[in-house]
């Protein structure tokens, strides 16, 4: 019986991709609904809160969790998992403090006032968001691809249900309702993942400084790699939030959210590649066909995103069509580079990844804010493309690894 249960839980690649696509569609629908109700300014502020917390979570957790998943190829010891779980619980208390500091900086720079309940709810959201980020990576340790995709979809459904329940009750604002709905969904997810981990490993939740130190040292390159890829995908919103208006950030992040429905595919393939220790990149078409296919995808997704914004949200939310096409192109290149990086990780090409990652971090943290200062949204997109193309060129030999 137990063997059959394991087989049921730990299989289902196609179901994983399909459920990820459903999750992205549901998340996009939810984002469009609350964006329309929040308005451009509040949507920009919400993006700032979510992105800064995610950046801190990535900085503290991402490399360690990626290294932990790589350890499953040779077997994972329960004491390592116990230390990891204790660490992410600890980090979950740290990120809300850092996020409050960023909100105070935002309030100082733009001379805006936040109600106390917004700050309190942001703290709760940040705690459970960080905890769920670390727990989701831990779930992939047991190669439970099918159950991971079901949990992802369930999280979005819970968010929608709680959000509309709070609106029906009428005791909270749209902004607070979004954060509470997400915090509740993350709480449910964390509980479910803990039960699965207890079933699979029965880890002891104890923090060993020696084990944690070894985890940090062994995962230093992976920390740099994952931190660079994840930060460079999101840090632009922090810089945009600090250097442009909230409305401009709101328009940009909303278009990115709509375009983000495409990202379920490279994201799912990347997770499967690690879980199955297999490459899914195989380019056997001519350059002309590749260019034509890319152009078709860019124009299709970009045109659809532009029309969704125009007819569902209205003209105040619109970005220029050329900029929307550029955002799509950047996300396609980002997805391809992410898959190349996964192949390099599987090939243990840590030294090369470390060199590339350091370059990307320097560009992202120092060149991007300058580009945004002078060129605004175009500066963000242009600097992202430069960083990604350099990374692809450096890792080109891992296309078929």
Image (cartoon, rainbow, N blue to C red):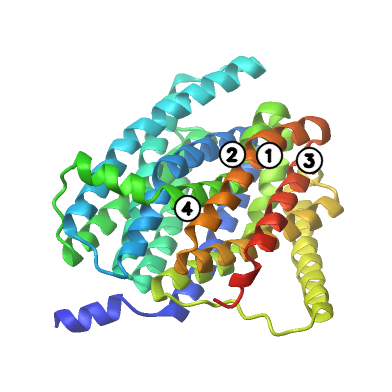
Q: Residue at x 46, y 46 (%)?
A: 163
Element carrying mark 2: helix
Which is nearer the N-term, disc 3 or disc 2? Answer: 2
Question: What number is the disc on residue 379?
Answer: 3
Q: Residue at x 17, y 65 (%)?
A: 199
Q: Are marks 3 and 2 in contact (CB under 8 Å)?
A: no
From the image, tell me which residue sits under label 1.
250
From the image, tell me which residue sits under label 2.
47
Which is nearer the N-term, disc 1 or disc 3? Answer: 1
Number of other residues with Cα within 10 Å of mark 2, as a class: few under 14, some 14 to 19, many 20 or more? many
Q: Are marks 2 and 1 in contact (CB under 8 Å)?
A: yes
Element carrying mark 4: helix
185 relative to 336, above or below: above
Number of other residues with Cα within 10 Å of mark 4, as a class: few under 14, some 14 to 19, many 20 or more? many
Element carrying mark 1: helix
| Nearer to us: label 4 or label 2 | 2
**Gap in Å between the C-alphas at discs 4 and 2?**
18 Å
**Gap in Å between the C-alphas at discs 3 and 4?**
34 Å
Which is nearer the N-term, disc 3 or disc 4? Answer: 4
Q: Position of residue 151 (x, y in %)?
A: 37, 63
From the image, tell me which residue sits under label 4.
160
């Amino acid at each position: 019986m137990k063997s059959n249960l394991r087989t049921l839980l730990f299989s289902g690649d196609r179901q994983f991709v399909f459920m990820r696509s459903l999750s992205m569609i549901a998340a996009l629908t939810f984002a469009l609904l609350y964006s329309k109700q929040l308005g451009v300014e509040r949507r920009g502020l919400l993006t700032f809160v979510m992105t800064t917390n995610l950046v801190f979570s990535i900085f503290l957790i991402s490399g360690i969790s990626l290294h932990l998943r790589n350890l499953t190829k040779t077997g994972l010891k329960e004491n390592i998992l116990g230390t990891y779980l204790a660490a992410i619980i600890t980090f979950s208390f740290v990120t809300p403090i850092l996020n409050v500091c960023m909100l105070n900086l935002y309030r100082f720079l733009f001379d805006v006032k936040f109600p106390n309940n917004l700050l309190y709810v942001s703290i709760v959201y940040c705690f459970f968001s960080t905890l769920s980020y670390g727990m989701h990576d831990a779930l992939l340790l047991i190669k439970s691809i099918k159950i991971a995709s079901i949990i992802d979809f369930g999280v979005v459904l819970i968010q929608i249900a709680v959000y509309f329940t709070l609106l029906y009750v009428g005791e909270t604002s749209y902004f607070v309702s979004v954060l509470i709905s997400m915090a509740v969904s993350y709480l449910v997810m964390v509980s479910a993942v803990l039960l699965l981990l207890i079933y699979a490993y029965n880890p002891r939740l104890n923090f060993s400084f020696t084990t944690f130190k070894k985890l940090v040292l062994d995962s230093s390159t992976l920390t740099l790699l994952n931190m660079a890829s994840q930060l460079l995908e999101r840090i632009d919103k922090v810089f945009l939030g600090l250097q442009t208006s909230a409305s401009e950030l709101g328009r940009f992040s909303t278009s990115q959210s709509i375009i983000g429905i495409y990202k379920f595919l490279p994201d799912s393939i990347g997770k499967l590649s690690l879980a199955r220790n297999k490459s899914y990149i195989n380019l056997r078409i001519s350059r002309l066909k590749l260019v034509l296919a890319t152009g078709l995808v860019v124009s299709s997704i970009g045109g659809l995103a532009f029309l969704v914004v125009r007819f569902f949200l209205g003209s105040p939310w619109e970005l220029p069509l050329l900029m929307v096409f550029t955002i799509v192109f950047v996300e396609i290149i980002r997805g391809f580079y992410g898959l190349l990086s996964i192949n390099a990780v599987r090939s243990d090409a840590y030294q090369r990844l470390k060199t590339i990652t350091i370059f990307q971090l320097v560009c992202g943290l120092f060149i991007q804010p300058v580009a945004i200062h002078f060129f605004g949204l175009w500066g963000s997109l242009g600097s992202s493309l430069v960083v990604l193309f350099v990374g692809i060129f450096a890792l080109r030999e891992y296309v078929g690894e």
